[in-house]
Amino acid sequence: MSALANRGESALPAPDGRVFSLDLWWLPRALVLGLVAFAIFGPLANLLLWTVAERWYFPNTLPLEYGFSYWAKVFSPRGVAWESLGTSILIALLTVLFALALAIPAGYALGRLKLPARSLILLVFLIPQAFPNLPVYVNIARFFYDVGLNGTIAGVVLVHVTHGLVFAVWIATAAFAAVDAELEEAARSMGAGALRAFRDVTLPLAMPGLMASGIFVFLESLDEFTGSFFVGAPDVTTLPLLLYTAGAGGNYQGASITALLLLVPSIAFMLVVERFLRADVLARIGH
Amino acid sequence: MRERLTGLLLALPAIATIALLYLMPLIASMTGAFETEAGFGLGNFVKSTELYTTDILYTLMIVSLSTLIIAGLSIAIAGYLTLGENPKAVAILRWLYRWPLFIPFIVVGQVLRTFLAKNGLMNNLLVAGGILTPLQTVSFLDWRGIVIAFVWKQTPFVTLLVAGAMASIDRGTIEAARNLGASRLRILIEIVVPQVRTTLLVGMVLSFVTMMSVLSVPLMISAQSPTMITADIAFRINAYGDYGVANALGMISLAMTMAVAIVYLRLNLKEKAK
C-alpha cells in the first residue's frame, strides 16, 4: 500500500521534453472495478438472459435459442401475471394511502409538537426493525384466520401497513421537523386557522419528504414476501408469490420475467432517491 | 397542555396500529412458544433442539459470517470512496456499488439461484474462459449461496451508512497523517474506521436482524436440510400446523438477535464511559 504514495513514478518524460503522464494505476483500478461490476451486473445479466431463453441447458454457456414466447405465455390474457400485477399494485396503493393517513398526523405530532414520552413513542416505531419479524407474521396469520382476514386483500394490506409504518413515521417526523416552525406561526398570526396553516404552509414544504416515504412504502409493499406468504397465500397472489411459485415449479423463464417486473421500480427508485430525500431531511432521521 | 393532548391524539392511531398488529402478535409468539398440549412448559424448546440444533448453529454461522464479510466489504468500498485520490475511479465505484440497494430479497434469491447454479452463468463463463472444465463445476446453492445472496444485497446498505459517516469526519487529521507519510490503508484502519465505529456497528446489527428474518433466500437457494431457522418455521406451519415448535424456533432467533443487540449496547456504553 505504501507504493500508492509513489504514484508520480509513472509520469514519463516524452521525447519533446514535456511530461507525458501515463497513469499505470488504471490497471489495478480497472481490474478491481471490473470485478465489482461483474459481481453486480453478472447475476443481473443472467436474469435478463433467462427472460429471453427458449432453450438453455448444461453445459451450454449461452441459451441455444432466444425468443419471447415465455413473455407471451406470462402475459397472455389468461395468464396469471396481469392478475398478480393488478393485485400487487392495488395492495401497494392501499398500503400507501393507509400508512400515510396514519403517519402524517403522527409525524407532525412527533416532529413539531411538544409530546410526552416522545422518545419512547419513536422507540415503539423502531421495535419492528429490531426483531426478526417472521414469528410476528406467523401469529398475525393465526389471528387473521380466526377473524376471517386470512387470504383477503384487506389482511395483506394491514400486514404491509404495519411494516411500512415504521419507515413512514420516521421519515415523516424528519420531514416535518425540517420545516421552519416560524412560517406556520406567521400564517397563524395573519389570521389563518390551525388546519389552514398546516394545509397551505407546512404540508407543501414537507411534501418532498412525504413523497419519498410514500414511494418507499409502495416499494416495500410491492416487494414484500414473508407476510404475504403467510397471510395471503394461496388466495391472494402478489407478484413475489407468483415469482416464488414459478421458481419452485422449475419455470425459470416465468420466474425471471416476474423478477424483472419487480426489479425495474426498485432500480428506478435507487437512481432517483436522492432527489426526494434531501440532506437536511436525512440528517434529521432519528432525532 | 392542549398541545400535548392534540399531539397524543394525532399520534394515537399509528401507535394503536403498531400495538395491535405488531406488539400483540409478538407477545402471542412469546407465550405460544411455551404452550404445549400438556399445558405450559418447555416441551416445544426440547423438541426444537432435538430436531433443529444443526439448523440453529447453521443459521448462526451463516448470518455471522455474512455480517463479517459485509462489514469488511463496506469498509473497503466506503474507505476508497473517502480516501480515493482518483475522482474518476471514485465516481465509477460510487455509481456501481448501490445497484442492489432496493432489490427485494425474493428477486435476489431468483437472480443468484440461476447465476450460481452448476449450469449458471458464473460456471459457464469460467468454463468458457478455460479456467474450469465442465466436470469440475460445482453448484454454489448451499450455505455459500445463502451467504453470497446476503452479502450481495446488504453490502450496499451498510456501505451507504458507513460512507455517509466517513464523509462527515474531520479531514484535518487525515491530511495531517497523509503529510506525515502514512499510507492510505493505515489511515483507513487507524484513523477513519475508529471514528465511524458506531455507525458501522449499527449497520451490522440492522443487517444481522434483517438476515435473521429473511424467508425467501433460504427457501429459494437451499431449502434442503441443513437450512435456516426461517425455512424450518415455515415448514412446521405449512406441513404440520405446529405453532408451538414454530414459535419456539422464533424465540430462539429472537434470543440470538437480543444477544447481538446487547453486545452492541455494551460496546456503546463503554465508548460513552471513556
Image (spheres, coloured by chain):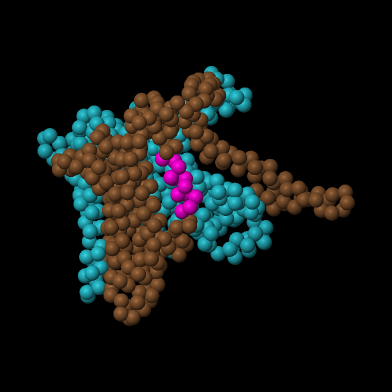
Chain colours: A brown, B cyan
Give the farthest residue toward the top.
Answer: B135
At 33% from the left and 32% from the top, the residue drawn is A80
Magenta segment's dominant SS is: helix
For residue A62, above or below residue B271: above
Write down the region rendered in magenta: A262-273
Residue A53 image point, x, y percent: 49, 26
At 72% from the left and 45% from the top, the residue drawn is A24
Residue B191 image point, x, y percent: 56, 58
In this rendering, the count of numbered labels is 0
Residue B235 image point, x, y percent: 27, 31
Give the farthest residue toward the right.
Answer: A16
Foreground pick, A96 / B145: A96
Look at the image and tell me in which quarter the C terminus of chain A lies. bottom left
Residue B248 image point, x, y percent: 23, 39
Residue A270 among those drawn in magenta = yes
The answer to whether residue B258 is visible is no
At 30% from the left and 53% from the top, the residue drawn is A97
Foreground pick, B50 / B216: B216
At 69% from the left and 46% from the top, the residue drawn is A25
For residue A187, above or below residue A97: below
Residue A128 among those drawn in magenta = no
